[in-house]
Amino acid sequence: MGGNLTSKVEYPYTGKNLFDKNSQIELTGQYRGYTTGAIYNNSDYIGIKVPINSSTTYTISTDLGNNFISNLCFFNSNFNYISGIAFNTMDRTFTTPSNCAYITLAVYNAYNWLQIEKGTIATSYEPYIAGTLGTAGKNLLDISDFNQTINGVTVTCNNGIVHCEGNATAVTNIYIPLKTNVTTDGASYCFSGKVTGLLPNNISSIRLLTTNNAGGTYSFAGTYVTIVGGQTKFLTEARTETYKYLLLYFNPDQTVNFDLFYQLEKGTTATEYEPYTVSPTSIKTYTYGNR
């Protein structure tokens, strides 16, 4: 255990808010209708076009409230229309199709801020941030803040630490999105989970996934880590792949109350847990106030 490994990398970085007002307003006084993606005129609205991941869940929030966003359309990488949703209800969470590369939305033009983020929870507003990352700490997992209850188990994530509490009434899978996708480069990596708190042996497991599907094909090392209270359990693998989700699996009828510390690092041995950190070399921040 121990050791502080860092690596020099240069790759694009985007904060939790994926909407860039400077480059993603496609239409002014117009928007795309959800039935076909055709353009309609309306001087009160703008149309935004945002690059997005496929098979991923997102939540939208704005200072105007939910009634001022509508006509959600999904497009592929060639910007061909796939499908759409009227999106004029209070539910602002959606999952993109498997071949989706862009979304478009109609947004009332009097808004001050708009946020599109991974996950099922609308978190506090953060301006769009983008740039290039420089020196990263050893832990490559930047986990989204998260809160979800399924089958009697509540899973929350704050500042990268996952807390699990409750008694599962059935076999349960909970998918936690990464704030920033992680791409491994073919070198050997180690994926680990350390547990503190109440966890009966062999009732829970974790996976690092390329998509929100629990199958081994989509998992780091093609399998799972069975987590044990008070111990660090890990897998190692050399593969080039992009990971987007963490999965927590619970067997039924066992009471749990524990904290889980995830880590993905280069090498073949799980070292002492460190939170995700990164030092920016070129970060641009756009702050939007009153229009």
Image (cartoon, grey):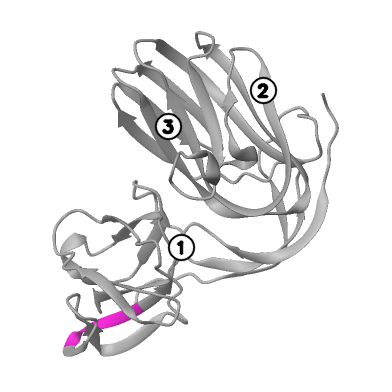
> Pointer 3 and pointer 1: residues touching (CB < 8 Å)?
no
Q: Is 231 rendered above or below residue 76? A: above
Amino acid at the residue labelled 1: Asn
In the displayed structure, does residue 33 sit left or right of residue 173?
left
Amino acid at the residue labelled 2: Lys
Residue 110 visible within the image: no
Neighbourhood count class around disc 1 (C-alpha, 10 Å): few under 14, some 14–19, many 20 upward: many
> Pointer 2 and pointer 3: residues touching (CB < 8 Å)?
no
Q: Please tell me in which quadrant of the rendered image residue 220 appears.
A: top right
Question: Residue visible at 13% across and 58% down?
Answer: 89
Q: CA distance from mark 2 to mark 1?
A: 30 Å
Give the structural element (helix, strand or loop) at label 2. strand
Q: Please tell me in which quadrant of the rendered image residue 193 appears.
A: top right
Amino acid at the residue labelled 3: Thr
Residue 38 placement (x, y as % from top left): 22, 87
Q: Which mark is residue 113?
A: none
The residue where tag 2 is placed is: 233
Whichever of callouts 3 and 1 sits on the residue coming sooner in the sequence is 1
Whichever of callouts 2 and 3 sits on the residue coming sooner in the sequence is 3
Q: Which residues are magenta?
A: 43-48
Residue 284 placement (x, y as % from top left): 61, 71
Question: Residue visible at 81% across and 39% down?
Answer: 267
Q: Is 125 rendered above or below residue 237? A: below
The residue where tag 1 is placed is: 53
The residue where tag 3 is placed is: 156
Neighbourhood count class around disc 2 (C-alpha, 10 Å): few under 14, some 14–19, many 20 upward: some
